Image (spheres, rainbow, N blue to C red):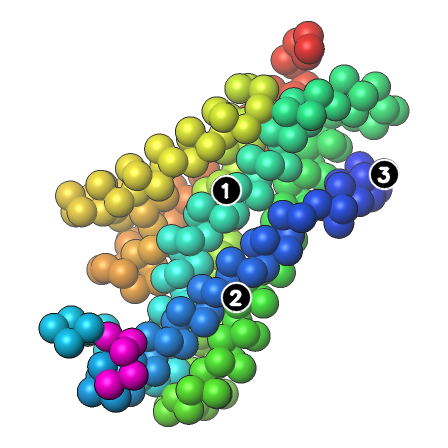
């Protein structure tokens, strides 16, 4: 397992994707801060050209509670895409770069390889979440948001991390899709299908019973989900890695 982890960390470190995802989440935190800046004084925002003359903007007060809620919503929605891309890239690259045979020739079990990949992707995504929180603190302070307190910060961090954990759990089936499809295309197709379905199901009012809609609902985009929604997320988070490991153990790698 240690050898597999070392190999996955080396691949990740030499890739450009970590920098790209870091930039994407930095932009997300900046967007949230911009929304708060506009909410502070809509007239000022129009005068600065940040808001169209006839545009309307609603979404709460310009304070830390609202800001942390917006960051959590961005992680729930944008994280599904970006975390999903991380997972698809981690598993699909072995087939896309035709290195899967070399990987399986190593004296390391296939389950250890899969476990290392999931461990690296989970740590990667959690670090991105922590970066979003820290960037949010700096940008929120720069904007001058009100309502600061230790309790608000702890609660905001807790919601952000829990939202990220659920989102990470829901990306695990994309690893199976990328593996079974032997490349990026199947994983990306599964990712897009999940994101699209989450939006449609949530609009129909059944988001609390569709796992990929639950993180966004929990983050505050709509009514919070009940216990069944969280149970479904946990089930996906268990089934995804187990199914992927079983596929790697039993599939015939003939390429």
Question: Does residue 50 belong to the magenta stretch?
Answer: yes
Residue 224 horizontal side relative to residue 124, left or right: left
- The answer to which of 40 and 104 lies nearer the viewer is 40
Residues drawn in magenta = 47-51
Q: Position of residue 16 (x, y in %)?
A: 67, 48
Q: From mark 2 to mark 3, how far is it between C-alphas?
A: 32 Å
Q: On the image, which quarter does residue 74 sit in?
A: bottom left
Q: Position of residue 108 (x, y in %)?
A: 83, 27
- In this view, which residue lies farthest toward the left? 54
Label 1 sits on a secondary structure element that is: helix
Q: On the image, which quarter does residue 99 sit in?
A: top right
Q: From mark 2 to mark 1, how far is it between C-alphas?
A: 18 Å
Discs 2/3, front: 2
Looking at the rendered image, the quarter that the N terminus falls into is top right
Q: Which residue in the structure is indicated by mark 3?
A: 3
Q: Position of residue 220 (x, y in %)?
A: 30, 64
Q: Which residue in the structure is indicated by mark 2?
A: 26
Residue neighbourhood size for the residue with mark 2, other residues' Cα within 10 Å, grouped as few (<14), some (14–19), many (≥20): some
Q: Position of residue 6 (x, y in %)?
A: 82, 43
Q: Residue at x 39, y 83 (%)?
A: 64
Q: Which residue in the structure is indicated by mark 1?
A: 84
Label 3 sits on a secondary structure element that is: helix
Q: From mark 3 to mark 1, how far is it between C-alphas?
A: 25 Å
Q: Residue at x 76, y 46 (%)?
A: 14
Discs 3/1, front: 1
């Amino acid at each position: 397992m240690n050898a597999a982890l070392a190999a996955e960390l080396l691949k990740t470190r030499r890739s450009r994707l970590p920098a790209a995802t870091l930039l994407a989440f930095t932009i997300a935190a900046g967007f949230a801060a911009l929304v708060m800046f506009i909410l502070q004084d809509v007239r000022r925002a129009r005068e600065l050209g940040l808001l169209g003359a006839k545009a309307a903007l609603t979404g709460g007060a310009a304070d830390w509670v609202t800001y942390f809620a917006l960051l959590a919503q961005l992680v729930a929605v944008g994280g599904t895409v970006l975390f999903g891309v991380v997972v698809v890239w981690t598993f699909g690259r072995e087939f896309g770069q035709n290195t899967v045979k070399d990987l399986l020739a190593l004296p390391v079990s296939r389950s250890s390889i899969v476990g290392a990949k999931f461990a690296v992707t989970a740590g990667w995504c959690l670090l991105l979440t922590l970066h979003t929180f820290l960037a949010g603190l700096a940008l929120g302070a720069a904007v001058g948001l009100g309502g600061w307190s230790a309790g608000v910060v702890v609660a905001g961090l807790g919601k952000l991390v829990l939202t990220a954990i659920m989102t990470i759990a829901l990306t695990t089936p994309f690893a199976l899709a990328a593996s079974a499809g032997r490349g990026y295309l199947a994983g990306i197709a599964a990712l897009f299908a999940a994101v699209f379905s989450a939006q449609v199901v949530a609009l129909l009012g059944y988001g609390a019973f569709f796992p990929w809609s639950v993180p966004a609902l929990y983050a505050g985009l709509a009514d919070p989900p009940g216990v069944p929604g969280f149970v479904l997320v946990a089930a996906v988070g268990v089934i995804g890695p187990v199914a992927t490991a079983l596929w790697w153990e039993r599939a015939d790698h003939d390429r």
